[in-house]
Amino acid sequence: MTISILPPAPASPVDSQGRPAVGAYQGYIDRVSWEGLRGPSARNALYRRFHRKTWHFVSLGGEQCMVAFAIVDVGYASSAFAYVFDRRARRLLGDLTFTGLPGTARVADTAGPGACSRYQGAQASFLVERQRGSATWTIRARGPAGLVVDATVDASAEPPALCAVAEIAGGVANCTHKTVCLPVCGSAGAFDVRFDLAGSFAAFDHTCGLLARDTRWRWAAASSAAVGFNLVEGFNGEVENGVWLDGRLLKVGAAEFRYDPKATMAPWRIRTVDGVIDLEFTPEGERREDKNLLVAVSRYVQPIGTFRGTIKPPGEPAREIAGLLGVTEDHVAKW
């Protein structure tokens, strides 16, 4: 087996025939929009309004802490969450969730240069922004419990983003971009604890889809100077599985997750069926949230911890992995 170079991202997630441009690519689609869909995939305006789900997630992880927040627009409501995990004390210092009216969250229609995603509510504000022509991301967050994030992410030497377009069972299609291995500077904290983010690395997840009412996935991701990966079981499936090694993006096969859903702080085993990735994940802590808003129900857990094991692309020596910071996730949503 050989790993081929992914083709460049298309101009649109919709092909010239009005169908989802299904596939894995490298780089950014300049504008993610489903307006060009034709035929059965197009559905109708009401369907598109209530099934269009978009989010922009960013994590900043290093020796001292893991900081993450997401800006989410599900059409009929806006939401956001944020957490600060103290790796030394192994505890969440801030774990905040906000729900607002439509328009409170605005997710950019691009995952790359020109992106500006915001959440502006009565209690909190979040910003993920990269101006056109700029090689830096600006990350800002303010919220209760003294939540403060002021960070700059350096994208001047970013590896290729992984762009994946997938057809969705029970829905229409989804487009996701994953960007990893970007160095961070700045600070973050909650309550009276502050962390210097120097030496941390960022990962981004930008997603826009016409999704099924019932959506579920298991996910694992990590980001460091030389190694990063994104793996999912369910949802988009194999199309969004990739690993970054020394700036190279390599596509990998379907992922298998082995863990106890009733004991998510126990070790997880994650591998790909092509044998490229074989890792054990040891949680240090986790963020957990179960919501029932009548029209939307979510069961979510995101352990934070480290990966160890091997990554072995075909024809290359095995790369030994130890202490690689990242997250796993088990998410079930009805929205």
Image (spheres, rainbow, N blue to C red):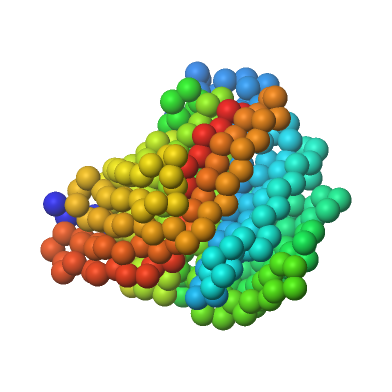
Measured as percent of width and height from the top left, residue 243 is found at 34, 59
Does residue 174 appear to the left or right of 243 in the view shown?
A: right
Q: Residue at x 13, y 63 (%)?
A: 315
| Nearer to us in this view, 90 or 236 | 90
Measured as percent of width and height from the top left, residue 318 is found at 19, 67
Measured as percent of width and height from the top left, residue 316 is found at 16, 67
Does residue 257 appear to the left or right of 313 in the view shown?
A: right
Q: Is residue 106 above or below residue 76?
A: below
Q: Residue at x 57, y 20 (%)?
A: 43
Report if residue 247 is visible in the image. Answer: no
| Nearer to us in this view, 166 or 121 | 121
Quadrant of the rendered image containing residue 15: top left
Q: Is residue 233 above or below residue 126?
A: above
Does residue 46 appear to the left or right of 179 in the view shown?
A: right
| Total labels drawn | 0
Q: Residue furthest right?
A: 122
Q: Is residue 176 above or below residue 22?
A: below
Measured as percent of width and height from the top left, residue 109 is found at 62, 48
Q: Residue at x 79, y 45 (%)?
A: 104
Which quadrant: the C terminus?
Answer: top right
Q: Residue at x 64, y 76 (%)?
A: 195
Report if residue 91 is visible in the image. Answer: yes
